[in-house]
């Protein structure tokens, strides 16, 4: 569970003419992770089978249809599966049919688009001419005159009349610009043109049209017809999409797998007479693999001894529930083959952390129900995994909500006696038996609760920090040996342990372990079961800072934890110097400051308390406000109160999903994984394919 | 001056409360400044590739540790003097 599955390196060897058979078999068993081959003296990388080019051509065409029809395979749950044989029989007929039905339609659609664009261009020219109001035959075809028809930014007449006054100009306003038709003697033509250019002149080509209105109507009519046809085509295409989507995808799947098979030689080494394929198979399934592949007696499977530089692929090996959490691990990185796979640890602690932070029965229930519903909507694998995680987190929130005694916010707040003033269901909640006498089991809104929880989460932090270094020690030990492991991780393990002892000693002097909880805290367990007391200092003993030496006599503040911390820190420092000085020189000592980073990371676990408290208080404020304005004497505002309640809790729920989720993830990625998890492994992807639309 | 208006104890309590508020508030501003750059970059990356959403969100919350430190300090202040 904590380690990726064991792999065996093997080679599949056979005569060259068996390559096609081998590719069929290997594809069917779907177990062999093929290594990219390196060419050697007699062995060259093979060439794809003959059928490959034909298949890839059909595939490209089919995929273009699929993308044109915007079919998303991840959103389709197949109603029935097709047999490969069935597809094989239908293939050429269906491809022709698609070419006929979809291909033609796509082409026609494109040509319609083009025609419409042409018509629109024409319209853009005719419309200003129509505004000008001069028939086109009068705008061109002169021998001694030059005629400028076009758009200018400002009135050019004044400037033009400086050249000559023998010209005629018609000027109309058109869409913030000026539309001009200027007639001038041909000899002034060039000069006029230059001047007009200064006014931003853009010429309009004059078409051969007698009546602009008639032509415009014609164009409009044509355009309408084309648009109708286009709409018809689109409905037809939509019909095909609905009817054929699954078959299209099934054929796509079939062709892709055929292509994969026929391209296997590219991943094999081929000599004149033989072929070799090298790869990895899960050790558990080696026998099964061997018997399948060697069935026809001409192909041999051979186990190869692994060499130092070999990098086997990683296949995570986890029980069903943990498999959902692999998603979160691989988002960070895929573990290396020899590394520990933290998914199982993640599964336990991510869920607990989420519950600890959100800790509300109402929200937990909503998350669970929501996730169960969404599971029926989003059917893809990734979503299903994510929603499964959401369900576990919802359940964990319900559990912690029971412990904290919260249902859409707390119903007991120190200082306010009546539950009905705090919570819209306050009376009902406190009237329930369990809530009445034994609840909350642990009250995190009370002052003592906050202190105790703060200490508990820091304990969790210390524990996980040490655990992380221990796992790191193992990882380095497996990869580089004992000495490296001690220098790199063991040293810090000891250092952090010393740090933890210091924190414990400090806490002991504060009285955290010894004094009992305040009266009335918790209602279920007898008082002496609470190990964690309050932060009060015993009477008569002044502890300004609980550090040895500051209290009467040097030994007064010394306790067992401080005594343990000292040798640990010394051992840490010695190992640390031995590891760093050879690498960094004398300035390596500065690196010891890193111990403070780990202290910071332990404190960082305080978010387990902080995020939860913020959500509790938001819920409390929402409840308090809505109860206040929704009950007498402010009864008239009841609808406002209800809206406030709904919107407020919806918003808080959203925050309550996002923040605990992210923070819990971050506590693992940043504070935990960095101690031992490097990642960068190759994912195990066997030759073959998970079938979605096909069956054997 | 101060003695005339309020008692010593109340003054200390008030200062502690202000300090606790500053600890969280200033830390919040710091974290916000840190997150702004990361957030902008993350949104850019997500625009390129939707698959970056999870990682982008995660990077964005990393500076939040600073606020947690501030919060711890404010807790300690409130426990000690509140």
Image: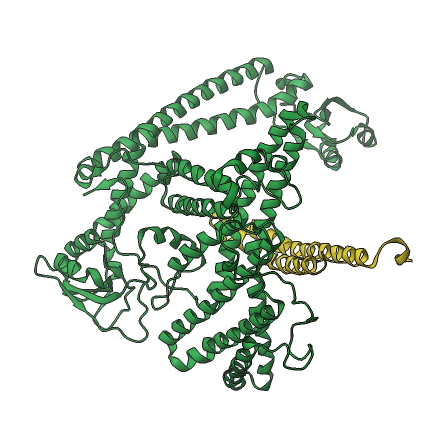
Chain colours: A green, B yellow
Picture layout, residue B56 above or below residue A156: below
Nearer to me, A307 or A624: A624
Left or right of A202 on screen, residue A276? left
The total of numbered circles placed on residues is 0
User: What residue appears at the point 16 percent right and 40 percent down from the top-left corner?
Assistant: A85
**Quarter of the image that includes the C terminus of chain A:** top left
- The percent position of residue A674, horizontal first and vertical second, equals 48, 66
Nearer to me, A79 or B27: B27
**Residue A103's image quarter?**
top left
Q: Judge whether residue A211 can be spotted in this image.
A: no
**Quarter of the image that includes the N terminus of chain A:** bottom left
Left or right of A126 on screen, residue A393? left
User: What residue appears at the point 60 percent right and 66 percent down from the top-left corner?
Assistant: A511
User: What residue appears at the point 16 percent right and 58 percent down from the top-left corner?
Assistant: A288
Picture layout, residue A188 above or below residue B4: above
Left or right of A524 on screen, residue A278? left
Nearer to me, A22 or A557: A557
Picture layout, residue A322 above or below residue A142: below
Q: Judge whether residue A683 can be spotted in this image.
A: yes
**Residue A303's image quarter?**
bottom left
Nearer to me, A308 or A442: A442
- The percent position of residue A146, horizontal first and vertical second, equals 69, 27
- The percent position of residue A332, horizontal first and vertical second, equals 45, 58
- The percent position of residue A12, horizontal first and vertical second, equals 18, 64
């Amino acid at each position: 569970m904590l380690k990726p599955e064991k792999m065996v390196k093997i080679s599949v060897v056979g005569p060259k003419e068996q390559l096609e058979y081998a590719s069929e078999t290997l594809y069917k068993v779907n177990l062999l992770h093929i290594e990219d081959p390196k060419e050697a003296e007699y062995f060259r990388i093979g060439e794809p089978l003959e059928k490959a080019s034909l298949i890839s051509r059909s595939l490209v065409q089919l995929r273009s249809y699929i993308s044109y029809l915007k079919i998303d395979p991840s959103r389709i749950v197949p109603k029935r599966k097709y047999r490969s044989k069935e597809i094989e029989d239908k293939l050429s007929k269906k491809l022709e049919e698609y070419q006929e039905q979809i291909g033609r339609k796509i082409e026609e659609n494109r040509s319609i688009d083009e025609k419409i664009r042409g018509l629109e261009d024409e319209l853009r020219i005719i419309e200003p001419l129509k505004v000008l109001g001069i028939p086109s035959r009068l705008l061109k075809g002169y021998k001694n005159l030059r005629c400028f028809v076009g758009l200018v930014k400002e009135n050019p007449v004044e400037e033009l009349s400086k050249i000559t006054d023998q010209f005629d100009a018609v000027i109309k306003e058109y869409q913030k610009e000026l539309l001009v038709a200027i007639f001038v003697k041909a000899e002034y033509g060039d000069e006029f043109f230059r001047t007009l250019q200064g006014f931003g002149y853009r010429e309009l080509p004059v078409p051969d049209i007698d009546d602009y209105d008639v032509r415009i109507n014609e164009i409009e009519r044509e355009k309408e017809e084309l648009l109708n046809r286009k709409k018809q085509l689109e409905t037809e295409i939509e019909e095909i999409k609905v009817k054929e989507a699954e078959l299209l995808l099934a054929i796509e799947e079939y062709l892709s797998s055929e292509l994969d098979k026929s391209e296997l030689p590219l991943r094999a080494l081929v000599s004149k007479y033989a072929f070799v394929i090298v790869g990895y198979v899960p050790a558990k399934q080696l026998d099964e693999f061997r018997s399948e592949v060697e069935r026809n007696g001409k192909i041999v499977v051979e186990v190869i001894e692994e060499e130092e530089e070999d990098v086997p692929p990683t296949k995570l090996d986890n029980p069903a529930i943990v498999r959902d959490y692999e998603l979160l691990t691989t988002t960070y990185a895929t573990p290396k083959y020899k590394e520990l796979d933290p998914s199982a640890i993640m599964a336990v602690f991510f869920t607990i952390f989420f519950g600890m932070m959100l800790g509300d029965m109402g929200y937990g229930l909503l998350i669970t129900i929501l996730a169960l519903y969404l599971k029926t909507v989003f059917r893809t694998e990734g979503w299903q995994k994510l929603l499964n995680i959401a369900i576990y987190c919802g359940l964990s929130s319900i559990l912690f909500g029971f412990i904290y005694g919260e249902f859409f916010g707390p119903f007991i707040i120190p200082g306010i006696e009546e539950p009905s003033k705090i919570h819209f269901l306050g009376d009902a909640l406190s009237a329930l038996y369990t809530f009445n006498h034994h609840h909350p089991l642990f009250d995190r809104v009370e002052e003592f609760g906050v202190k105790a929880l703060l200490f508990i989460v820091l304990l969790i932090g210390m524990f996980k920090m040490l655990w992380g270094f221990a796992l790191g020690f193992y990882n380095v030990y497996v990869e580089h040996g004992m000495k490296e492991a001690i220098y790199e991780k063991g040293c810090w393990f000891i250092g952090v342990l010393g740090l933890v002892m210091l924190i414990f000693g400090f806490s002991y002097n504060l009285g955290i372990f010894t004094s009992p909880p305040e009266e009335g805290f918790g209602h279920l367990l007898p008082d002496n079961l609470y190990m964690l007391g309050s932060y009060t200092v015993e009477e008569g003993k002044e502890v300004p800072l609980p550090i040895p030496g500051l209290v009467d006599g040097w030994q007064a503040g010394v306790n067992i934890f401080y005594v343990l911390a000292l040798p640990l820190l010394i051992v840490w420092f010695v190992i640390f110097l031995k590891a760093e000085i050879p690498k960094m020189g004398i300035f390596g000592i500065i690196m010891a400051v890193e111990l403070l980073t780990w202290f910071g990371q332990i404190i960082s676990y305080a978010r387990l308390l902080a995020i939860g408290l913020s959500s509790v208080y938001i819920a409390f404020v929402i409840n308090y406000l809505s109860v206040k304005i929704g009950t007498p004497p402010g009864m008239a505002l009841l609808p406002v109160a209800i809206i406030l309640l709904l919107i407020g809790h919806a918003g808080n729920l959203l925050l309550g999903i996002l923040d605990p989720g992210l923070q819990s993830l971050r506590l693992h990625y940043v504070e935990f994984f960095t101690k031992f998890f490097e990642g960068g492994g190759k994912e195990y992807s066997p030759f073959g394919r998970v079938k979605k639309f096909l069956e054997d | 001056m101060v003695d005339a208006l309020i008692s010593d104890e109340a003054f200390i309590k008030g200062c502690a409360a202000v300090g606790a508020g500053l600890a969280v508030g200033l830390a919040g501003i710091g974290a916000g400044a840190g997150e702004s750059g990361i957030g902008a970059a993350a949104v850019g990356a997500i625009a390129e590739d939707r698959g970056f959403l999870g990682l982008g969100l995660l990077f964005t919350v990393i500076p939040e540790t600073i606020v947690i430190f501030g919060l711890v300090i404010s807790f300690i202040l409130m426990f000690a003097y509140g």
